[in-house]
Amino acid sequence: MNVEPRKEIHPRPLLQRPMWESLDGTWDFALDEVAAWQAPDDVQWNSTIEVPFAPECQASGVGNTGFFQACWYRRNVEVPQFASNQRMIVHFGAIDYRATVWVNGNLAATHEGGYTPVRADITRLVTPGEIAEVVVRAEDDPKDLAKPRGKQEWQLEPHSIWYPRTTGIWQPVWYEVIHQTAIATLQWTPNVERWEIGFEARVEGPELAGLSIRLRLSARGVEIVRDEYNVASREVHRRIALSDPGIDDYRNELLWSPSTPTLIQADIELVASNGEVLDRVQSYTALRSIAIQADRFVLNGRPTQLVMVLDQGYWPESGMTAPNVHALRRDVELAKAMGFNGVRKHQKVEDPRYLYWADVLGLMVWEEMPSAYRFTRDSIRRLTQQWEAVIERDRSHPCIVAWVPFNESWGVPDLPDSPSQRHFVQALYHLTRTLDPTRPVIGNDGWESVATDIIGIHDYDDNPNRLAARYASGGPRLFERERPGGRLLLIGQSHGGQPIMLTEFGGIAFSDDLARSWGYTRSDTADDLAAHFQELLEAVRGCAIFAGFCYTQFADTYQEANGLLYADRRPKFPLERVALATRGPRTARNWREDSQYRERLMAMLMHAYASPSEEHSTRPEARP
């Protein structure tokens, strides 16, 4: 096989093979405004596009923000030499919304859902050493409100809190050649209480007798596990017991947290009965626990306040796609440099490489399903199937600490009066808990909770004193009388003692062009924004009822100018000042004395301000 190992970050960090080839770059392209073309031979190719940028954004070279029903891609691919017992797989990180893939005129794959991977086994459709034509059709009705679309605008021009549409390929395209019998999926489930890691692997391809999986785990360069397991019915399920160091200091060194994001490297081999290694993959996991205890969020057995920022995950020239892989790391570094220990990724399922950097650098993530905006049989089916695929893709990332299937009753607008809509929220809450019982689930973030492990409240009151007074005491009055956003906080239930978090607040707009920008409230100067931000943070931190909070928002996004950063990630006021306000008065008082924190923060600031550098490894360091 003539594919060379690559050094940049792997597009699928949790299941890496060293031999893969990117197909990003220039493809032939055609817009299909009314979805008239049904097959590759129908297409009138008339332009090119830079993949993986969506045609709506400038980085793609197309920049068409109008309405169109479908678009087409074409590229000739040099097929590597591979043996008769190998397969060639083409991967698309995400195609929005309904994808069809042809290779040499033959149907190779179909997929529905704009935020989950598309996989095409093209082995039988290509000849090793020759050129193959790959064609992709992306169908995406711009006005369809019954599909999961998140913040993608359905009107011609973006307005309020909605942004330009994303059609077609918007995450990396790549291929790999693997053995016909290979590892298809891996799942990791840490258990700190038992000091063990759950390991699940599924094998695909012709079933062979006597298969086994060899597993080697190491942390900070020290081997901690070397074992081999028999494959039964194409699967392996094991609970891997680790040696408990006993003393807390040593235990804490091995636990993953934002302050010590220790990762455990995994080297995995699929071995035939004759000893031949059929497949080799690299992965990683971490030891960490997430729990809800009474009214607190608990990380590794310790109550932890979530200090989060809402992050939309858009860039000015490239939309939902990062302009380059360095931008993903930079966003994680900026969030940490501003003093936050987590982000709430809002209405977007992020590129896995962002989650990789959150794992490596230590940033907790709430993952949220992009909303549909109508409640129909079709929207129920789509949301359920795609949410299950999202959890399957991402549940092994240590950084993810909560799942959010619904936001602000979007897609279920009549929750107070509609039993079927309430049942749907409850059903997805319980489905999520079934698929992943290790993390809390926020059934409907913002208000109108009908099933949840955390009560999330959205309140954009810009008066710090009023905000503090509203939440100072909590208790029955909060749930019976207060209606942030004009909505009840609970429906059909009383408060069961769950943690309460203010998961959206702030939203202060500051821009050089306030006349054309939008926000929940406004500041006239950068100093005014900094002062208002600090006052709001002090008010929220002073409310003992809150187990955490999430400030809106990380960066300006198109017309929404309420970021702490401009859209290009320049700070609106110094990051040091943001961090001190975020961390609170204790940090400010101890700034000179706490040299360890100061050095750590300054290192983050230097990384965040610096120009991105070339990445040299696809393997996360054990302790960055």
Image (cartoon, rainbow, N blue to C red):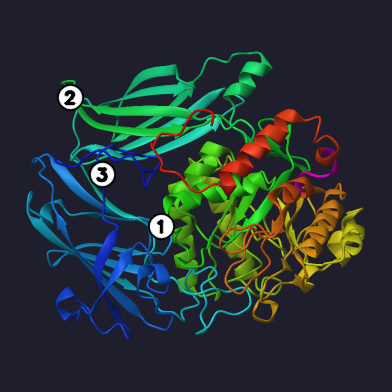
Would residue 416 appear left or right of 113 to someone viewing this image? right
Camera-nearest residue between 301 and 80: 80
Q: Residue at x 38, y 59 (%)?
A: 94
Q: Name the residue nearer the viewer: 518 or 456.
A: 518
Query: Residue shown at 26%/44% (left/top)?
Result: 20
**Which of the two labelled residues, at mark 2 and mark 3, occupies the earlier sequence position?**
3
Q: Amino acid at mark 1?
A: Thr
Q: Nearer the viewer, residue 437 or 89?
A: 89
Q: Secondary structure at mark 2?
A: loop
Q: Quadrant of the N terminus?
A: top left
Give the magenta range.
Answer: 582-586
* Disc sitting over residue 116 in the figure: 1
Above or below for 168 versus 300: below
Name the residue rendered at 56%, 62% in the picture.
Answer: 568
Q: Quadrant of the C terminus?
A: top right
Res. 409 image quadrant: bottom right
Q: Nearer the viewer, mark 3 or mark 1?
A: 3
Residue corresponding to mark 2 = 276
Please give the name of the residue rendered at 35% of the width and 27% of the height, measured from the top-left corner. 267
Mark linked to residue 20: 3
What's the distance in space between the residues labelled 2 and 3, CA to CA?
Answer: 21 Å
